[in-house]
Amino acid sequence: MRLDVTRSDGVPLGEDETLTLAANDYLLLGGGEIFTPITPDGGYPLDVTQPRVRDLWVEWFKARGGTINAEAYMTPEQLRWHLPDPLPADCLWQD
């Protein structure tokens, strides 16, 4: 699968730009082997002085009344994912 990253205004992220992702320590430390194919030798650097992602989510939900409504974040006109075909039932990593 090819991945194109664009901003909300449709402008693509440039090849010389850096994209920062937040992931929980479980995944970054090898849980579920999700990042195993792309994990650098020696693993990812973890800044233990930063708040945990789960705690940030809890704060985010509390600030919004403790609920989430999908319609507030996605409409047929403003999809977050644009896939040309349905995802396969299973996925194999390929180098």
Image: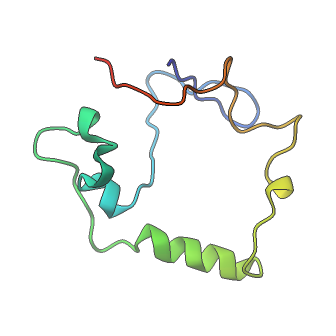
In the rendering, at what x and y percent does residue 17 appear? 46, 30
Q: Is residue 55 left or right of residue 85?
A: left
Give whichever of 10, 90 is nearer the camera.
Answer: 90
Give whichever of 36, 89 is nearer the camera.
Answer: 89
Which quadrant of the rendered structure holds the C terminus? top left
In the rendering, at what x and y percent does residue 57 appear? 56, 71
Q: Is residue 78 left or right of residue 85?
A: right
Residue at (27% x, 34% y) in the render: 38
Give whichever of 64, 31 is nearer the camera.
Answer: 31
Give the answer, above or below, for where 93 lies relative to 62: above
Q: Is residue 20 left or right of residue 72?
A: left
Residue that extends furthest to the left in the rendered view of this protein: 42
Residue at (40% x, 72% y) in the render: 52
Q: Is residue 59 left or right of residue 73?
A: left
In the rendering, at what x and y percent does residue 80 appear? 71, 39
Q: How many marks?
A: 0
Give whichever of 18, 80 is nearer the camera.
Answer: 80
Give the answer, above or below, for where 21 lies relative to 55: above
Residue at (43% x, 24% y) in the render: 16
- Way the structure is coloured: rainbow
Give the answer, above or below, for where 57 lies relative to 65: above
Q: Quadrant of residue 92?
A: top left
